Image: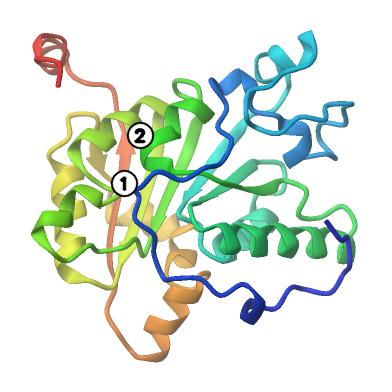
Amino acid sequence: MSKSTRLPRKRFYRARAHSNPLSDSHFPVPIMPSHVNYSIHYPQFFPSDQTTDDSGNRTSALERSFTKTCVKNIQFADIGCGFGGLLINLSTLFPETLMIGMELRDKVTEYVKERILALRAGNPGQYQNISVVRTNSMKYIPNFFEKGQLSKMFFLFPDPHFKEKNHRRRVISPHLLDEYAYTLMVGGIIYTITDVEELGDWMKACLEGHPLFEAISKEELEADPVVKLLSSATEEGQKVARNEGQTFQAIYRRIMPSDTEKEELSSAPLN
């Protein structure tokens, strides 16, 4: 890809607002987190002779054990990252933290890749800690992240899937929260925001009802610099602000279950 400092133009990367997460898309998926090729995402942090993508086709012992031996791991994941606005804002706020956007739409993913390359070229030494991958996060989260690896997950303005029959497509649901809880470290935070009140209530209810998450206090939210970005860093958030619309946040912390909850979880039937 070109390393021009000129930012890509969105009009050349037009795509539908959302994609069906239950459809079968064809893109490489690592068979396990240790097969994620960090060098193609963060070349400044991980210079390497690796030449493969994230499909799991490894060519060396170094590659097979890469995430287990590297000093850094991805800590932030922006699920459905759109055009990358949040990633770019977080990059300078947490310059030493690796973060990745996960996007299903191919043209949008390509736009974010080109945008990051242009920002790196135009700002030497900056934006080296962000990347994007085309994938279906509703299916492949465990393929990318180890247990307790992430400290923050973001779900900003997800597809509301208004029809009741399509609620199973929502990116926040009780069974998907099990996977998110697996990849979040204890104390990690899940951030959600939407401009659809019904979806906001849904996401809050799902998080409130899950034994591994607890709501964060108002005082903590006010002190968290990330919270301010939720409604301002993305194109969708800016559109809502221009229209003077409302937003609905649900921000929860990953916790350890109580002894009683541990027993209930261990005795729960498998789906």
Q: Is disc 1 placed on a helix, strand or loop?
A: loop
Indicate the colouring scheme. rainbow
Q: Which mark is residue 229?
A: none
Tell me which amino acid carries mark 1. Answer: Leu
Question: In this image, 171 relative to 239: left or right?
Answer: left
Tell me which amino acid carries mark 2. Answer: Tyr
Q: Residue at x 41, y 71 (%)?
A: 17
Residue 200 picture location, percent across and down? 21, 62
Q: Nearer the viewer, mark 2 or mark 1?
A: 1
With respect to residue 146, does 225 lie above or below?
below
Q: Nearer the viewer, residue 156 or 62?
A: 62
Kindly identify which residue carries mark 2: 180
Q: Is disc 2 placed on a helix, strand or loop?
A: helix
- Label 1: few (<14), some or many (≥20) within 10 Å? few
With respect to residue 263, does 93 lie above or below?
below
Q: Residue at x 25, y 64 (%)?
A: 160
With respect to residue 118, does 1 lie above or below?
above
Q: Residue at x 65, y 32 (%)?
A: 54
Q: Quadrant of residue 241?
A: bottom left
Residue 249 picture location, percent across and down? 29, 61
Split into 4 quadrants, where in the image is the N terminus?
bottom right
Q: Nearer the viewer, residue 60 or 121?
A: 60
Q: Residue at x 31, y 63 (%)?
A: 159
Disc 2 and disc 1: Cα gap in Å?
18 Å
Q: Nearer the viewer, residue 10 or 22?
A: 22
Kindly identify which residue carries mark 1: 22
Question: In this image, 154 relative to 112: left or right?
Answer: left
Q: Earlier in the sequence, mark 2 or mark 1?
A: 1
Residue 24 picture location, percent across and down? 40, 43
Split into 4 quadrants, where in the image is the C terminus?
top left
Q: Is residue 142 visible?
A: yes
Residue 80 picture location, percent across and down? 45, 55
